[in-house]
Amino acid sequence: MKKLIAFLSLIAVISCGVFPAFAADAPAPKLEDRVTDLEAYVTNGARQTNAATALAASPGPGHNAFQMVSAALVLFMTLPGLALFYGGLVRRKNILSVMAQCLGITGLVAILWWLCGYSIAFHSGKPFWGTFDWAFLKGVDSTPNTDYGAWVSHNVFSMYQMMFAIITPALIVGAIAERMKFSAILLFVTIWMFVVYFPLAHMVWGIDGMMNGVWNPNAKIHAIDFAGGTVVHMSSGWSALILCIILGKRLGFGKEPMPPHSMVLCMVGTGMLWVGWYGFNAGSAVAADVVAANAFLTTTMATAVASFTWGMIEYVLKGKPSILGFCSGAVAGLVVITPACGFVTANGAVIIGLIAGAIPFFFCYKVKNWFGYDDALDTFGVHAVGGTIGALLTGILARNSANANLATNLKAYVTDSALQPLVWEQLKAIGLTLCLAIVGTTVIAFIVKAVVGLRVSEEVETIGLDLSEHGEEGYHAEGGI
Amino acid sequence: MKKLIAFLSLIAVISCGVFPAFAADAPAPKLEDRVTDLEAYVTNGARQTNAATALAASPGPGHNAFQMVSAALVLFMTLPGLALFYGGLVRRKNILSVMAQCLGITGLVAILWWLCGYSIAFHSGKPFWGTFDWAFLKGVDSTPNTDYGAWVSHNVFSMYQMMFAIITPALIVGAIAERMKFSAILLFVTIWMFVVYFPLAHMVWGIDGMMNGVWNPNAKIHAIDFAGGTVVHMSSGWSALILCIILGKRLGFGKEPMPPHSMVLCMVGTGMLWVGWYGFNAGSAVAADVVAANAFLTTTMATAVASFTWGMIEYVLKGKPSILGFCSGAVAGLVVITPACGFVTANGAVIIGLIAGAIPFFFCYKVKNWFGYDDALDTFGVHAVGGTIGALLTGILARNSANANLATNLKAYVTDSALQPLVWEQLKAIGLTLCLAIVGTTVIAFIVKAVVGLRVSEEVETIGLDLSEHGEEGYHAEGGI
Amino acid sequence: MKKLIAFLSLIAVISCGVFPAFAADAPAPKLEDRVTDLEAYVTNGARQTNAATALAASPGPGHNAFQMVSAALVLFMTLPGLALFYGGLVRRKNILSVMAQCLGITGLVAILWWLCGYSIAFHSGKPFWGTFDWAFLKGVDSTPNTDYGAWVSHNVFSMYQMMFAIITPALIVGAIAERMKFSAILLFVTIWMFVVYFPLAHMVWGIDGMMNGVWNPNAKIHAIDFAGGTVVHMSSGWSALILCIILGKRLGFGKEPMPPHSMVLCMVGTGMLWVGWYGFNAGSAVAADVVAANAFLTTTMATAVASFTWGMIEYVLKGKPSILGFCSGAVAGLVVITPACGFVTANGAVIIGLIAGAIPFFFCYKVKNWFGYDDALDTFGVHAVGGTIGALLTGILARNSANANLATNLKAYVTDSALQPLVWEQLKAIGLTLCLAIVGTTVIAFIVKAVVGLRVSEEVETIGLDLSEHGEEGYHAEGGI
Amino acid sequence: MEFPGLRTQNYMKKIEAIIKPFKLEEVKDALSEIGVEGMTVTEVKGFGRQKGHTEIYRGSEYTVDFLPKIKIEAVVADSRLDAAVAAIVKAARTGKIGDGKVFVSKIDEAVRIRTEEKGEQAV
Amino acid sequence: MEFPGLRTQNYMKKIEAIIKPFKLEEVKDALSEIGVEGMTVTEVKGFGRQKGHTEIYRGSEYTVDFLPKIKIEAVVADSRLDAAVAAIVKAARTGKIGDGKVFVSKIDEAVRIRTEEKGEQAV
Amino acid sequence: MEFPGLRTQNYMKKIEAIIKPFKLEEVKDALSEIGVEGMTVTEVKGFGRQKGHTEIYRGSEYTVDFLPKIKIEAVVADSRLDAAVAAIVKAARTGKIGDGKVFVSKIDEAVRIRTEEKGEQAV
Ligand SMILES: Nc1ncnc2c1ncn2[C@@H]1O[C@H](COP(=O)(O)OP(=O)(O)O)[C@@H](O)[C@H]1O
Ligand SMILES: Nc1ncnc2c1ncn2[C@@H]1O[C@H](COP(=O)(O)OP(=O)(O)O)[C@@H](O)[C@H]1O
Ligand SMILES: Nc1ncnc2c1ncn2[C@@H]1O[C@H](COP(=O)(O)OP(=O)(O)O)[C@@H](O)[C@H]1O
């Protein structure tokens, strides 16, 4: 709409103050600079900050569009993607509780994010903690923040990252499904975000984060994590394991059959997760550039290969390839490629797919039964295990040919060999993440237990959380029964 | 593909006629102008119409891509988003009827739109009505229409707006669900589009519309409505109230229990609505620019806050936060932020979210029971009430800092204070919309009643609309029962 | 993120070798050329290859973003779109088998694609077959391949095309649902891709393909197929017919009632197919340009009109418009417009919609019963018939005004008249596709029958494929029954 | 657990009522009112005089003779039988075809699982 | 509503047949043919000689002993009993394990809710 | 098919047990153990002493008096009756309200569709 004109003139107005060079009375910026700036937009290159061109303060449409769509896709992963993937796997009497947990966490985390979460995670500050300067998203406007995306609006970037902050605790739900109090979940997540997620996000992605190997030259650990192998999957997966152990098994676990009440919903959720994950992985390039393009390819290959691998392993070992197998494989592939997608080649992705289809399979089918913990929907087996393998494989398979930034910013660590120095950095990052998640969750769990109690009563669990905790039933037949 | 070359040359060819300046034989446009035009694309600024650069007649890829995706997202809101959100809430015997209504309306409205709807709504003409010059979408091609989007193809814009025209009458379905004749719905919608929707869309968004406060300096009412608080939600919501009153209550309403046959479908629909709504709200910027970026943020915050608010109110008042509560809150948040999203700040959005979670709650839980009308799925409580509050709050919370166009085009009305003049303009717009919807619907309803009758027979209603009106059942068990 | 700077410098580095003109020591490219290149990005025009500007080797953000989103949308069509559309139509005991087939084919085809499928289909080579130079996606990186998209990363294009290669065999599943062995399907698809799909894709879309009328001046057949009427729908549809005939009817076909177990899932799938199809059709422009914009409009109009037409035909002939009718019409419309979407006008699209709503209807309701073959979910009636009509109508309705490339590259064939020469080219293409699909499928079917057998045992078919072939059930009630 | 002699007598009856789904609430209330404290409800499909409908899915037409009904089973003491049947008939009646049936049969023994109470105490 | 003396006689029987789902249509037709005008059908799961299957969901394996069956209940006059049972058996038979059962029991009274007709007139 | 005289005797009984869904597995095993080779299971909703819950959907509140239960039907020879009932009661008992009931009634005849075997051989 005509607003554009209006907007342009405003830019002009603003600029008078900010960029004298651009003000009517001042000499216009050199044509050369203006063209360079335009080229920078196309290649997602650094902006001409010395000369204030008309582009100053403006996001680049291609990149901005991609980022907004990516943010929407990541939300789609949680609502309804994850809600369906998990919801389909629980018993009918608990389907709504899973959905309520996803919805409740979405609202809660969004509020925390606006309050100060984003500021703590992404504002520069300490190596493991930001500041409160962006509290209430103050000053987070449509002008790009070049620390995170030269051509993407800062407010869009903050919302994009919020979607990550939402899905991470939502992943934990899978392990404690069908027995944890709704109030306990809300309280747990609230504390967990401050103790585990915000710090971890800052360490790994914050511009001065201590594990931000690519963008922070002074990082203590020169690790890399493109889209959240440590921040999202390891943190949620390991926390999930601890929490489900402290929580205890579901009544009748191992005795009564507890088959998924709807594999159909589960499969639908899987499809949505896969589609949405492109926003998660390719979107993490914060631009529709060459890096995003590579991430798109690696994500696709790894996921498809992992899905097929898992299914075929079942075919060979059990005689029957199951839907749940194909779905679990796909999700495992997506999880394992997450930290690697922006750094590995197509063949690297295929290797990752093979491993992602095999190792989590082993954990979900065997290890789980050996130890006998009740990780209801295998959050640990898929996300913790997958995220950890992913972080490690990223260290082994990251290649300069796949991402130019490695050559520039991590020359010493990425030597294009399987045992390149980066591997050790990744191991350090894995260790640190692991500790933070395990210790943090243990402490929080006991606090929550003391305050509101973790578990619903036996009767509530027997009748189902839907009726008892939310006063609803998932399905009603004619006559309202 | 290589077509590009071809295309370029064509542009050249065309240009010979249209833009001599560009023709081979004529002097080429000044480099300066060409760069300015390129910059205009990036900032979504006004095009260089004086000098015909190579960009002449071409849309801008970033903006065009965003608009196409946004249009697809808005369609996603109706199919299957709304169909699921509503369908999950009806009784099992009527699930398909709701879906048929959404599908039927989609086809019907698309045809009306192509016939002359778009032309009436968006071609300049009278203050409340366009012309027929774009009938059959004649002349609506890939070249941007700078009245509505300097860098978005005109045909894409027309399709984008068509998706709005589709979902609006589809929203009405919620109020009259489970008892209105399919034929009556088709007839009602056909007339309603001409009497209520097309005129309203023209008044509010048409470049010379009488309520287009931002872009029409001669507007009689200097109101603003970014994405359709009045055009979409108030119009459908108030019409829905009238129609469901004239139609009467469902058999057994208040006596038999009529719980949602599948809260699961309802929740899935909610997630899709939320995701699709980004196309609805951010897409209304008709560019992936700073305004869209802001709309993306405000939409996210308002929705998340409203969802959480509604759920927590239930938690406090009823002891149980319900899925339907979280879902209703999310939709209410989306509705209320719709007219405001492009004009308010992050904090404004949070305030809107709080109000959106509270007031519609009050209407759905209390007011409805006081008056006892049978607004089956609360179209009135959520869309009419939400849309009206939204239009008002937009007046109160619109800020120059959130949208530069306010500063330029509505200086006198937006003074950055709660009781700025804009508020009164909004009230006028609310009044006008209200009258049009109520009067229009009343008249149409009685016409339709006279022609085909509004309501299905008692027997049909008892057996369910799926079997009687569409000859299908939603679900079949083994053995085909 | 800061990577951009890094990336830019790398470009610089690389350039030293590749484009001396750009190297620090060499004279910089003329400003004029740089601007021309920027304009080329916006208009999706040919790149300045003579002068190496900063854009060299870089994709264009707007186009790249659109292509990535389009690829995700096409995946969405299969997972979960098609899985739901088909899954809803089968009996409850076979719902998972359909989903497993979609998932299995996705993984399998992705691996074949990476192995050499992409290389065979898209690398220049023979008129009907490429080479193995891109095997393992070697050299398929983020730099655009100007043969297919001047401003879209090559790896993104390859993934986009992979999504087509996935959904095509998945469409066949509809005809042979509820009775074919999972192992047989995997084997059949593997061979079928090499015999039918890869060659056909090369002939129609390969830069030197023998039926690539638009981009290959030396094409033997100057046919056009914008998004896959022949490659995707005819190939799968006709193969489906042959396969279901060889396979034989389902037990009890015609005797027992076999109503869709969930029209709800079917409708949800339809909505997803429609939304995803925008990636399929508009995305086939491989740019967010004027051609994509036109394809977006034609796809929308044809689909909406076809859906409404089919429903209304039922209304008139059967007295009841069914959901399945509206859904079938929508899918038929999408199928028929597929080859035409980039070449016809809005009115052409409406005509196509009308025909698409009528002829497939006739085939599904009458022809099928006359011949009595058991095309379980009407893959033939909708995709084969629709694809064939579409290819023909494309010949009749293609207009220079709709796509500039026709004027430039097919002047002799597109004379803007109903019986323009293009029609005969289209008929040739139809004939060739038909033969390839029919002969190929027949041979493959008998090979597979000999190797693993095509059909499951009577007992397996009676109990259902879910339990017998995949060891799962679609739905479980309380108590695990 | 022994039931001496009980099996010869018939002091309890089982009432099976097939009704229209939307009548369930009314019937339930009617039964509670006359003191029937328990019942078991099943979703069923009924075939009878009430004619079904034709369903058309593309080429294939089916006559759906089975309509959704609800089956109520209540075991009552003989003393309550007449009142119970009367209450059901009254509450379930619409006068239109398809209202359903009530069937009465003998119950030899009833046990309340929780307490092992038998006979009338169990129902 | 009184049923003098009726309750002593047994002039109606209830037939419960458990069959394979895909046989429903045939059985229904067979019954209609011999004049049985009504029946009630329920979706059930059956456990019997027909062996179930193993379902595997990641780590957990279940043997599914319960297979989908359909239960047909038809109350008929004694005079019709033999014909009805024979018709069901004939139509439902595949000869394979799992074909199901037919059970016959007494019905003391039947009432047609719509008309309050009783006894044989009611069924 | 004729059943001479059979219909006068009562040598088989039908056991109907309404139990809590999660007890199904245990009950099934208990019955198999004592040699009951077949049973039919139905998903039902139960109304009884066990109080229901309130469901709230926006403005409308419902008291859900019907709770999910499972109905097991097993026809057994008289000789097995006591053992079977005892097994069910034992396995289904939690001691909490809502455990359910067991009802016993006479079966006049049973036929195995596959073989046309009758009486005890059929069950
Ligand atoms: N002989 C029967 N045995 C069992 N159920 C029956 C019988 N006859 C009717 N029913 C049940 O009663 C329902 C209503 O019977 P119907 O003949 O349709 O109407 P009406 O009850 O008015 O005579 C049927 O749908 C069926 O469920
Ligand atoms: N004693 C029984 N009581 C009730 N239902 C039974 C009984 N035995 C078998 N059934 C039902 O009959 C069905 C078929 O029985 P099954 O033993 O599997 O095969 P067959 O009928 O060939 O002997 C079972 O699935 C079950 O539903
Ligand atoms: N008179 C009855 N007839 C049929 N079913 C009954 C009867 N009474 C109870 N039931 C069934 O038994 C279930 C449990 O009964 P209830 O009174 O709730 O607890 P308890 O079995 O501990 O007394 C009920 O949900 C219902 O399904």
Image (cartoon, coloured by chain):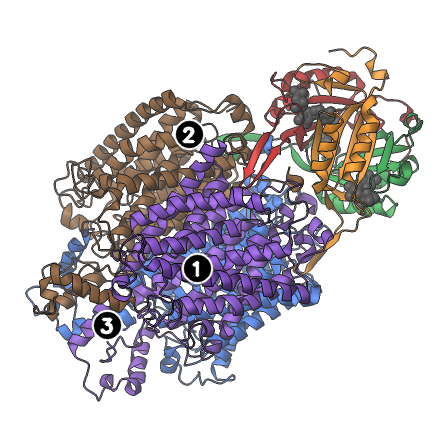
Chain colours: A purple, B blue, C brown, D green, E red, F orange
**If the image is split into quadrants, where does the N terminus of chain C sit?**
bottom left
Image point (31%, 30%), residue name: C191
For the residue pair F31 and E50, the one nearer the viewer reads as F31
Q: Is residue D110 above or below residue A212?
A: above
Q: Amino acid type of disc 3?
A: Glu
User: As drawn, is B157 to the left or to the right of A245?
Assistant: left
For the residue pair A322 and B448, the one nearer the viewer reads as A322
Image point (34%, 21%), residue name: C446
Q: CA distance from mark 3 to mark 2?
A: 57 Å
User: Which residue matches tag 3?
Assistant: B39
Element type at marker 1?
helix
User: Which residue matches tag 1?
Assistant: A430
Q: Quadrant of ligand 3?
A: top right
Q: Residues within 10 Å of mark 3 (few under 14, many from 20)?
A: many
Q: Do residues under tags 3 and 2 come within 8 Å of each other at their CB atoms?
A: no
* Residues behind callouts 3 and 1 on a single chain: no
Q: Amino acid type of disc 2?
A: Ser
Whether residue B277 is visible here, answered yes or no, is: no
Q: Amino acid type of disc 1?
A: Ile
User: Which residue matches tag 2?
Assistant: C183
3 or 1: mark nearer the eye: 1
Q: CA distance from mark 2 to mark 1?
A: 40 Å
Image point (73%, 21%), residue name: F123
Element type at marker 2?
helix
Pinpoint the chain carrying mark 1. A
